[in-house]
Structure formats: structure tokens, C-alpha cells
Image (spheres, rainbow, N blue to C red):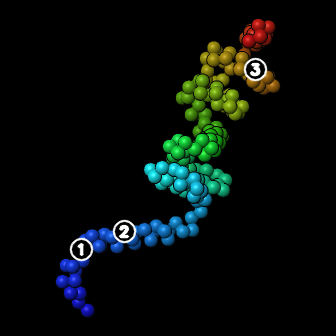
Amino acid sequence: MKVDRNILKRIKPFYILFALTICMIILVIIINYNADYNFDLEYIKTLPWNKRSTYIKQKEYLSKLKNKENYTDEDLILFNQLISISKVLEDTDTMKYVQKLKYEYLLSSIKNIINSEDFENLIVSDVFKTKLGLYLLYGEDKLLVGLMKNSTSKERLQILYLLKIFYPDKVKNYEKFYTKEEIENIDLIIEYINLKGE
């Protein structure tokens, strides 16, 4: 059956675009029908028009993170997007929640790096304060041994001082890196600070 050319000429491009738009809307509704974003309809009504789609996007991203036990680097991208969206929406609760998830993920990633075989190579090229900060954060002996081996005498004294304050029970494990005089000097400094009450 041949389509009459006159009929095709009568159908204007506008109608074709309109039909395609309707098809796209139906397709989006079908795809999102089973999605569970838990929209608060009353809250959406209070938002200005330009923020409503942002709120929907926020709920979509949150649903992707829901009930996940282990996060990946792809989730880190979601964390950053959610933090940006929450700032736009001025949603401090969601922002704090996502920042907590991001913080926990980054800490577990650092811990995995510390436990990796290549860690010894990484620690040689890293900055002293960063390495020391990581040790104070985690208390990993492997981290401190690598730090002691690759630090100057002044840096080792700083480490001893911090060990005496934050990890006094671990000082004996690292006494081999210090002279008796260095240990006594650090003890005197700590005593002096305690006497002054600082």
C-alpha cells in the first residue's frame, strides 16, 4: 500500500516533533516507573521551579547509594555530585550524611593503600607531615617504621615527642631509633610543658 504524497506534504514538521516529544515523555515515565526515589511532594512544591529538577536528581543519586555496603571510586563521583547538589538546595542534613560517607570511604581507601605491597615505595616519596598525619590517624606500625627509616634526626625527634603524647604505650617499640639522651631530652620537654600547663 503506497502512502499518498499529498498526505505526507500535509503533515508539518511541527506535528512530527510533537509526536516524538510525547513518545520521549512516555518512555521516561516507563523507565522511571519502578524507581524508588521517595520524593517529598510537599517539599517539592515549596521549591522554586529551577530547583525542583535538582531535588529529583538528588533523590535519584541517594537511591543509588542506598543499602550499599562497599563503595567504589564511581560512588566517590556520586558523593561529590550530591555534596554540590545539597549546597544548591541548602540541604545541610543530606550534605553532612554524604560527607560522612565520603570521609569513611576515603579513610578505608587510605587503609587499603597502607596494607598494600607497594606502600613502601609510596612512602619514600611522600611528604613527612603527610606521613606523620596518616600515622596519627591510623596508628599503623608499618607506616611509622617506614617513616622512621626515611626521616632526618630532627623529624625522628618530632615523632618521638608525638608518640610520647598520643601513643605512650608504643614508645618502647621504637626506642632502637633513638639514643638514651634523645629520649631523656624529650621527656624533659614534656615535663616542662606539663609544669607550665600548656
- Whole-percent x, y for residue 81 in the image: 51, 46
Amino acid type of disc 3? Ile
Quarter occupied by residue 34: bottom right
Q: Position of residue 63 (x, y in %)?
A: 59, 57
Q: Residue at x 76, y 19 (%)?
A: 164
Is any atom of residue 184 visible in this view? no
Q: Is residue 97 above or below residue 10?
A: above
Pointer 2 residue? 21
Q: Is residue 177 above or below residue 18?
A: above
Report how far apart the C-alphas of labels 1 and 2 lie in the structure.
15 Å
**In the rendered structure, which disc, 3 or 2, sits on the residue that comes first in sequence?**
2
Residue tagged by mark 3? 165
Dot 1 lies on which element? loop
> Which three-letter amino acid code belongs to the residue tagged 1?
Lys
Q: Which residue is mark 1?
A: 12
Q: Nearer the viewer, mark 3 or mark 1?
A: 1
Instruction: Give SS at disc 3.
Output: helix
Residue 124 higher or lower than 160, as above or below: below
In the drawing, does residue 37 fall left or right of residue 11?
Answer: right
Amino acid type of the residue that numbered disc 2 sits on in the rendered structure: Thr
The C terminus: image quadrant: top right
Q: Which mark is residue 151?
A: none
Secondary structure under badge 2? helix
Disc 3 to disc 1, C-alpha distance: 81 Å
Looking at the image, tell me whether mark 1 or mark 2 is earlier in sequence order.
Answer: 1
Query: Toward the viewer: 170 or 7?
Result: 7
Q: Is residue 190 visible?
A: yes
Which quadrant does the N terminus fall into?
Answer: bottom left
